[in-house]
Image (cartoon, grey):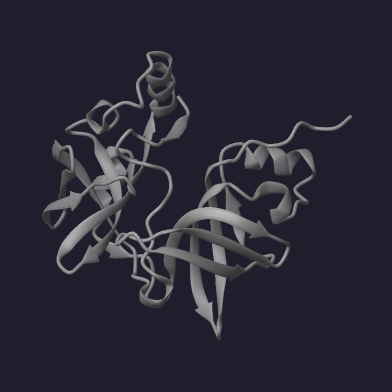
């Protein structure tokens, strides 16, 4: 079964982001879910139990999420609950921010039990950070996204794009293969797409090392 990305009723796709001037390192922890509530999840890791706050900025990736979302929509519901997608006892990876001692889950992703057992809490890198939002503009050499921070303030942040920038998303590998692997970011990422960007500072610019398309905006019909 394909892995799907789900925006739950209480877990919206529009992402989390610390204001650019105060960007935080993203840490990750892997383990087994031991408890869940409407606004939190507890995970047993190699170093002990960790509790994470969950809100409308948390992104959830899980098997079967797309099927459950479609079923909820057909029934006139806004979406399934977290407990309907992530189960107690399931192995997960949590990407989170430490906000003054309170751990906020930015993303929860289902993983294999072997991966969870082998991992410990880590930080992506000392210099690399992540941000999520909606693409405002994109060209072969740059991309700008916007969104809102945890305090409700809005942000706009631009990144440089180069041949080393990886673009990841459902169906993008197929699209690239159809063109012999020779594609540009403007063929894969469009204004209105919801994305997560991994980036680091290079001089006075922010360089995007990876762009993950979480939800693609509707594309205009192809002209024949």
Residue at image coords 37%, 56% = 16
Q: Residue furthest top?
A: 75
Foreground pick, 116 / 2? 2
Quadrant where the N terminus is found in the figure? top left
Left or right position of 82 against 2? left
Q: Residue furthest bottom?
A: 203
Question: x, y percentage for residue 155?
Answer: 46, 65
Question: x, y percentage for residue 138?
Answer: 67, 59
Question: x, y percentage for residue 197?
Answer: 50, 59
Quadrant where the C terminus is found in the figure? top right
Residue at image coords 29%, 38% = 10
* Picture quadrant where residue 68 is located: top left
In the image, residue 67 above or below residue 161: above
Residue at image coords 14%, 38% = 37
* Picture quadrant where residue 174 is located: top right
Left or right position of 40 against 186? left
* Picture quadrant where residue 113 is located: top left
Foreground pick, 157 / 196? 157
Residue at image coords 68%, 37% = 219
Foreground pick, 128 / 180? 128
Q: Residue furthest right?
A: 224
In the image, residue 195 above or below residue 126: above
> What is the total number of numbered labels drawn onto the structure image?
0
Left or right position of 47 against 178? left
């Amino acid at each position: 079964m394909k892995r799907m990305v789900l925006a739950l009723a209480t877990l919206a796709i529009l992402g989390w982001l610390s204001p650019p001037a105060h960007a935080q390192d993203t840490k990750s922890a892997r383990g087994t879910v031991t408890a869940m509530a409407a606004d939190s999840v507890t995970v047993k890791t190699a170093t002990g139990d960790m509790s994470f706050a969950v809100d409308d900025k948390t992104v959830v990736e899980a098997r079967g999420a797309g099927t459950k979302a479609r079923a909820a929509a057909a029934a006139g519901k806004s979406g399934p609950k977290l407990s309907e997608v992530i189960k107690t006892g399931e192995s997960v990876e949590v990407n989170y921010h430490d906000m003054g001692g309170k751990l906020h889950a930015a993303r929860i992703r289902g993983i294999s039990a072997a991966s969870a057992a082998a991992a410990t809490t880590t930080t992506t890198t000392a210099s690399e950070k992540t941000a999520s939002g909606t693409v405002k503009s994109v060209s072969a050499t740059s991309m700008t996204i916007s969104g809102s921070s945890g305090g409700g303030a809005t942000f706009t942040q631009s990144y440089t794009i180069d041949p080393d920038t990886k673009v990841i998303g459902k169906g993008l590998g197929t699209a690239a293969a159809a063109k012999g692997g020779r594609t540009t970011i403007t063929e894969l990422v469009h204004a209105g797409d919801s994305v997560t960007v991994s980036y680091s500072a290079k001089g006075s610019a922010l360089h995007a090392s990876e762009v993950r398309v979480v939800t693609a905006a509707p594309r205009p019909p192809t002209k024949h």
